Image (cartoon, rainbow, N blue to C red):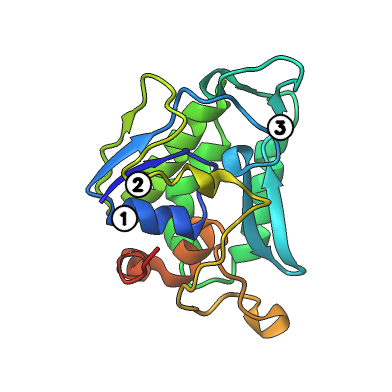
Amino acid sequence: MNMIIHPTYFPNIASFVGMSLASSLVMEAEDNFQKQTYRNRAYIYGANGKLALNIPVRFTQKNRQKYSDVKIANDEKWQDNHWKSIESAYRTSPFFEYYQDDLRPLFKEKKEFLFDFNIECIQAISECIELDLNPEKTTEFIKNYDDGNDYRFLVNAKKEPVFSFDSYIQVFSEKHGFIPNLSILDLLFNEGPNTLNYLLSQSM
């Protein structure tokens, strides 16, 4: 299938299922930024349950701003905090040590633009799971696509559809049960080299 999607911060499993099944992939680069979406948010499984990681951005609702122009607020130590949260959540997972050296650099070097950083995160995960992604970027904003391959709705954190994805063992599942459709990080650290097989076996 063809697919158009928003590049988000360590995308959720639904987004990666779609990307893994897509025959061609387009990243939306011409839309306006909106708050309270997965553009700058990811959910992981912490010791107390679902935990949000939010990237601080320089953005005001009063002035419309293209997503690709939104800058990260790097005066806050969000990178250190996010990595500490990820490490705390997954250091006992089967594959954290296997992948940490591939992902740790993303939290070391400051990036200026949110869009570019999200693309980098997606590329890093794709390399970890050996998924060959060669996405294009939109050159104009089109509100509606008629071919049924518009998956930009996956960016909405508050209006998230329910997917019937297979469960897998999570670090804290004995305490809080299975939490579906978290960040791809959760699947990666728990399933490791089986991540791509899992993604390809699911349906949207």
**Which residue does the numbered mark 2 point to in the structure image?**
149
**Which residue does the numbered mark 1 point to in the structure image?**
20
Q: Is residue 3 left or right of residue 114?
A: left
Q: Is residue 201 left or right of residue 59?
A: left
Helix, strand or loop for disc 3: loop
Helix, strand or loop for disc 1: helix
Q: Residue at x 50, y 78 (%)?
A: 167
Q: Amino acid at mark 1?
A: Ser
Q: Which mark is residue 191?
A: none
Alpha-carbon span between mark 2 and mark 1: 14 Å
Q: Amino acid at mark 2?
A: Asn
Task: Decide which of 134, 73 is in the foreground and name it.
Answer: 134
Alpha-carbon span between mark 2 and mark 3: 30 Å
**Which residue does the numbered mark 3 point to in the structure image?**
56
Task: Decide which of 152, 27 is in the foreground and name it.
Answer: 152
Q: Residue furthest bottom?
A: 174
